[in-house]
Structures are given as structure tokens and as C-alpha cells.
């Protein structure tokens, strides 16, 4: 009788690990899927520029949690004819998402997700300066 109970306890611990959330209340499944940016906003103390609104830019993020660690694929269309693709990873324990060489904090509520990178760079018109990049997305 002891062996079946041990197997049950082991199986339940595996199920719990697969569905666990981190201290931020996120689970990998919460982020999986396709996300479309409604805002791609650079801001500094003086200025805010949303590339979606200003240039017609668009960004799609796809998060695949079918293999550990979850993988990220992005496509950014700048609205002026250029596109960029990048890959990355999700660190659910730290509530971060890495795209290329940039790390974003993740905040998700329902079908909306906000990514924030406080070490971005942007030219507001007077040369490239430090800026916060905030990307607001909706699940497709």
C-alpha cells in the first residue's frame, strides 16, 4: 500500500510544480500565446513618444511554453518600412521577459500585459538619450 501512495504524492508534486506561480502571481501559462502592442512608448522626464500612434508602428510577441524555458519571438514593424525580429526567454520567477539583449519587467492583468524596460535608448530630437520603454499589449 505504501508504494501507490508514494507514487500519488510524487505525481501531485509534479502537477503542482507545472502549475505553480511565482511571488508576482504569474504562471508561464498566463503569458503564453500571441500578444499585439497597442502602445510602444518611449518616455523621459520631458517627453513621451508612442511609436504606434506617431508612426503606425506595430509589434507582435509570441510566447511558447511548450518547451522549458518558454521561448519568445517578436516582430516589430516601425511604420516606416523597416522590420525587426528578435527572440528571447521568460523568467517567470523574476517576472521578466528578455527580448534580444533587453530585459523587461512583466505585469499582466487578464488579457492585457505591460512590459517595462527602464534602460532603453531613444532619440527625442536632440540625440540619443536614456528612456523608459513601455509596451502595452493585448492577447490575440
Image: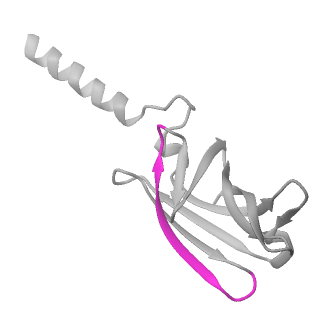
> Residue at image x 70%, y 65%?
121
> Does 81 lie within the magenta span?
yes
> Could you tell me which quadrant the N terminus lies in?
top left
Left or right of 22: which side holds 107? right
Does residue 53 sit above or below 104 in this rendering? below
Q: Is residue 22 above or below residue 136?
A: above
> Is 134 one of the magenta-colored residues?
no
Relative placement, left or right, of 51 versus 94 is: right
Considering depth in this image, is 117 or 45 the residue closer to the camera?
A: 45
Residue 61 rendering spot, x and y as whole percentages: 57, 63
Q: Quadrant of the C terminus?
A: bottom right
* Image: magenta residue range: 79-93
From where the camera sits, is residue 1 visible?
A: no
Determine the residue positioned at 53% across, 52% down.
97
Looking at the picture, how far across and down is residue 92, in whole percent?
48, 41
In the rendered image, the residue lying farthest to the right is: 46
Of 15 and 132, nearer the camera is: 132
Whether residue 102 is visible: yes
- Residue at x-position 34% and y-position 54%: 67
| Residue at the image point whose x is 23% and y is 19% from the top | 9
Amino acid at each position: 500500500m505504501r508504494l501507490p501512495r508514494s507514487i500519488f504524492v510524487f505525481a501531485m508534486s509534479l502537477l503542482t510544480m507545472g502549475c505553480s506561480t511565482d511571488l508576482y502571481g504569474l504562471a508561464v501559462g498566463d503569458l503564453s500565446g500571441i500578444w499585439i502592442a497597442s502602445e510602444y512608448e518611449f518616455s523621459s522626464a520631458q517627453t513621451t513618444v508612442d511609436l504606434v500612434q506617431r508612426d503606425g508602428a506595430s509589434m507582435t510577441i509570441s510566447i511558447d511554453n511548450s518547451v522549458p524555458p518558454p521561448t519568445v519571438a517578436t516582430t516589430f514593424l516601425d511604420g516606416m518600412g523597416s522590420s525587426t525580429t528578435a527572440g528571447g526567454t521568460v523568467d517567470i520567477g523574476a517576472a521578466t521577459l528578455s527580448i534580444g539583449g533587453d530585459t523587461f519587467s512583466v505585469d499582466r492583468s487578464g488579457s492585457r500585459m505591460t512590459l517595462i524596460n527602464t534602460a532603453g535608448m531613444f532619440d527625442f530630437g536632440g540625440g540619443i538619450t536614456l528612456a523608459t520603454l513601455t509596451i502595452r499589449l493585448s492577447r490575440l
